[in-house]
Amino acid sequence: ARSFADIGDIVRGRDMFKRNNHDNVENGLREVFRKIYNGLKDKGIHHYKDDDISGNYSKLREAWWKANRDQVWKAITCSAPGDADYFIKTACGGGKGTHGYCRCINYDVPTYFDYVPQFLRWFDEWA
């Protein structure tokens, strides 16, 4: 879940790792989101118009993550072997596990670590 959450921070431009102007991942993501922004129709461009000023596209990145986090989870976990019982017993609430699948039966991603601030995840991990 931490890797998933870290990917979420990177995609949303919130990663606390010290960046520089030569950060190829961040520069590549800015280019990807610039292309997505430029491809939006009128309604979408108006909704995200403030993002164009900063060049970071924060609102668009957040919206993309919200819409696609389940697909990122699926890409990370769905090829895992059946005995890789990730959150198997408690993942889906109410004592229901993932039943050997990569997600809960209702297709929810079985973690919300990607919405916990990175410094709190680090504190938990390193404390």
Image: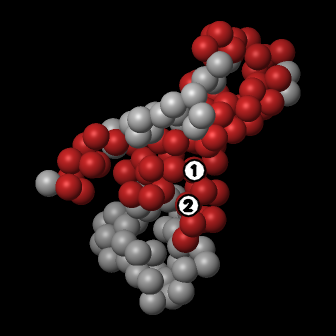
Q: CA distance from mark 1 to mark 2?
A: 6 Å
Tell me the element at label 2: helix
Disc marking residue 69: 1
- Can you tell which mark lies on residue 98? none
Question: Closer to the camera, 5 or 95?
Answer: 5
Residue 47, how many percent across, how many down?
Answer: 68, 16
Q: Which mark is residue 73?
A: 2
Q: Quadrant of the N terminus?
A: bottom left
- Whether residues under marks 1 and 2 lie with C-beta atoms below 8 angstroms apart, the answer is yes
Give the residue type at disc 1.
Arg
| Image quarter of residue 118 | top left
Number of marks in picture? 2
Residue 92, x across and y down, in percent: 40, 65
Mark 1 falls on what kind of element?
helix
Residue drawn 76% across the image and 16% down it? 45
Residue 106 x %, y %: 54, 63
The correct choice, above or below, for 5 with respect to 18 in the image is below
Badge 2 amino acid? Trp
Q: Is residue 26 left or right of residue 98?
A: right
- The one of 25 and 34 positioned closer to us in this rendering: 25
